[in-house]
Image: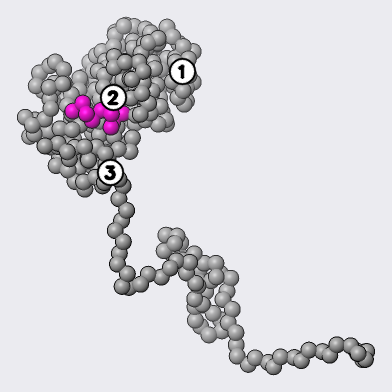
Amino acid sequence: MPPKKAGGKAPKPEKPADNSTKVEPSKDATNAITTDEQPGVQSRNKTSSVNGTTPTVPSKRKAKSMDEPSKTPRRSARGNPPASVAPVKILQFLLSPASLDICRPKDEIEDIKERGAGIRTYSASSFSPFEELVCAVVLSRPISHALGLRSIRTIFNSPYEFTTPKKLREAGSEGIREALDVARTQHRQKTAEELSLLASAVVESLGDGEDDVSLEGVRKEADYDVDKERALLKSNVKGLGKTGLDIFFRRIQGLWANSYPFVDQRTLTAIEKLGLPNTAEGLRELMDEKWSELNNENLGAGSDEDKRRKAFVRILERAVGADLEGKIDALKAEAEKLS
């Protein structure tokens, strides 16, 4: 190299060599997410190739002193619901009018306030077997609980009132689609087409004319056998699969004694959350055992056996409604208040 010019800056003295080995944490170790921060993901810390030790990754969380007392979990202003409630109280509350608003969508409550308590609702009204089949088709679509029940309120009330095969056939898929547009639901065209086909199937194969809503033809052809009834309905009603059939038979057992007792899997989940027996027979036995203690005055006319079936259906419907609305804890809290 050429010599430095006179007057130039003196070169900086070189630092003495550091004989100690400096360990740099690997990039993987520095950026690793610990398994307690992301469950199911293994830590990616690597062992140093220099001294065989794992570099320490500074935690972003403040270390908790061993002497620091545990904090009490924050409770909501309304308090925590009871962990378990006596099953008889759950049954009593589910059969009472007070449970209805917990088990139905908020917009249904608002609709009743606006149009009056006389409107027909899936939550509280009695339907014919044909109407129950219509509901099963609507509710088997992949839509929310609120949208399904709003669709049912729309098509069964004024100005549409599609309550018989004849009325559905006269409306056709276009008229049914119009009602579903008003309901602001989803899958409107497909649902409209399926309901139109349902009406034709009842008139041509499953019923006794355009005004027949009993579906008694289904029962007779199936020899009053539940499995055969399910198979017959599935083969004749487009869009009615296992989910729709479960919904239909959960409700229709209040009218068709041969299908009682029945609890579908979705409703079984709800009644288990409420602490009720997890089988249809177990629930029926509990209800029969506590029958004299239950509110069975608002179950309509009929024999004692008819009322027990209706009570069974009401318990199932309100239990699954509360679960779909995310109000299981609220229901349990209200039931616990019963004396």
Specify start and end residues of the magenta stretch as a single range.
Answer: 96-104
| Position of residue 223 measured from the top left corner of the image (x, y, whole percent) | 21, 19
Instruction: Tell me the SS state at disc 1.
Output: helix
Q: Is residue 36 above or below residue 6?
A: above
CA–CA distance in space, label 1 to label 2: 20 Å
Sequence-wise, the earlier of marks 1 and 2 is 2
Residue at figure coordinates x 40%, y 21% from the top left: 151
Q: Looking at the image, do the residues carrying marks 1 and 3 touch, with CB atoms under 8 Å apart?
A: no
Residue at figure coordinates x 17%, y 38% from the top left: 337
Res. 333 image quadrant:
top left
- Residue on which the image places disc 3: 78
Instruction: Tell me the SS state at disc 2.
Output: loop
In the picture, which quadrant includes the N terminus? bottom right
Q: Is residue 296 above or below residue 169?
A: below
* Tag 3: amino acid: Arg
- Camera-nearest label, 1 or 3: 3
Q: Is residue 165 above or below residue 109?
A: above
- Camera-nearest label, 2 or 3: 3
